[in-house]
Image (cartoon, helix red, strand yellow):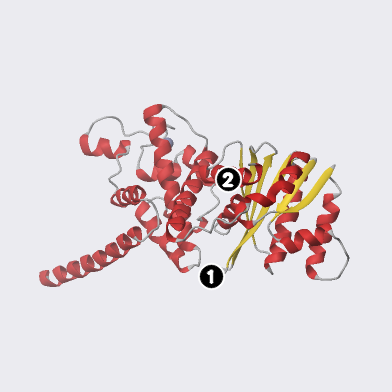
Amino acid sequence: MERNNKRLLQQESTSKNKQNSRIWHQVWDLNIKHKVKHFLWKCLHDILPTHDNIFKRTGKGEPWCRRCGESAETLEHLLFFCRTSEQIWKTFPIQWDGLEHLKGSFWSWWESLQQARERADGKAHIEMTTNLLWHIWKARNNWNFNLINQEGYRISQYAMADWFEFKEANLLNTCDKPENTSVLNSHDKTAELQQQHSTIIYTDAAVDQQRDKFGIGITARDNKGNLISTWSIPTSLKGEVATLEAHAIRTALLKALKENWTSILLLSDCKVLVDKLNHWSEDLSDINIILRDIKTLSSSFWRCTFSFVKREINTCSYGLAKFATNLVNETRWKNSFPVWTSTAAQTDYLAVAS
Ligand SMILES: [Zn+2]
């Protein structure tokens, strides 16, 4: 009898070990910063120095959450249930509604989250989510040690920007940089056009064929080069690249109308489209339905000009479009921008202005 029990216990522990090693493997396999992996590892071991953990282990201090004072600061409280954390999750573009009931145990929640790996974009969503957890922890520390209170939506924006920057840096390391062609000489016309309009809007579309995902990127700045606003918009619209580019232009016009911008220069790196818009002739192709829309919308502005921009200097919107292929909901940045966006926009601007 005793021997049977022992065997059962052994079997249980072997299967638990296998399960554990699978979970650890999945942690190390994530394309995220090392410090974030270590953070996640501590969460899964429940050894993060939360007030509750410190109190249980050393008897020192108080177990209570200092942000809300409503509950002991356990790992789960701090990551999911604290009011600030709830706000952060609400503004995060990736939602895990199906895992609501598992939030009481971080391990179970994380384990179920791994099922998303079966989806094409699941791993990226897990990586972004892990980055968010890390940023929730950082924000908690900022509050506890520096008394800095950050708004929830900002923290979810930081988390996404941070993840994307890391991803981009990895990509840059693995790809050769494009050849430095003599793009600078041919931009006199664009430079002149920029001075004639108060808002310059760059548009682009990106396709992730492997995952069948489409995204639109829009960058708006004033004619001095300052960023005003950027958008990353995932779209379910499918079709030729030109159709997506046209969709990006139409979306940009709708955004501009909403913002009450009156004098806009709209840039696209799709030359066919720009030519079609500038030398308009009716025909019945699919793409013309969108183009007719664009023409109608453009008449709502005091001044609206379409112009071609080379791909090499449309990098900010391209980055935003690529980013959008990872998103579920539209994301907008205004007033403050992730470093990679500012840098790309600045490079695009200088290439024309210099
Ligand atoms: Zn709390």
Ligand 1 is within 8 Å of the C-beta of the residue at disc 1: no
Q: Is residue 122 visible?
A: yes
Q: Amino acid at mark 2?
A: Thr
- Tell me if 58 is positioned left or right of 126 in this view: left
- Tell me if 134 is positioned left or right of 328 in this view: left
The secondary element bearing badge 2 is classed as helix
Please state the horizontal and vertical placement of residue 110, each as a whole percent of the image: 39, 56
The secondary element bearing badge 1 is classed as loop
Residue corresponding to mark 1: 210
Please state the horizontal and vertical placement of residue 109, each as a whole percent of the image: 40, 56
Name the residue located 68 percent from the left edge and 64 percent from the top edge. Answer: 237
Name the residue located 46 percent from the left edge and 69 percent from the top edge. Answer: 118
Name the residue located 28 percent from the left edge and 62 percent from the top edge. Answer: 20
Ligand 1 is within 8 Å of the C-beta of the residue at disc 2: no
Q: Quadrant of the C terminus?
A: top right
Q: Quadrant of residue 257?
A: top right
- Tell me if 254 is positioned left or right of 176 in this view: right
Q: Amino acid at mark 1?
A: Gln
Name the residue located 86 percent from the left edge and 61 percent from the top edge. Answer: 280
Q: Quadrant of ligand 1?
A: top left
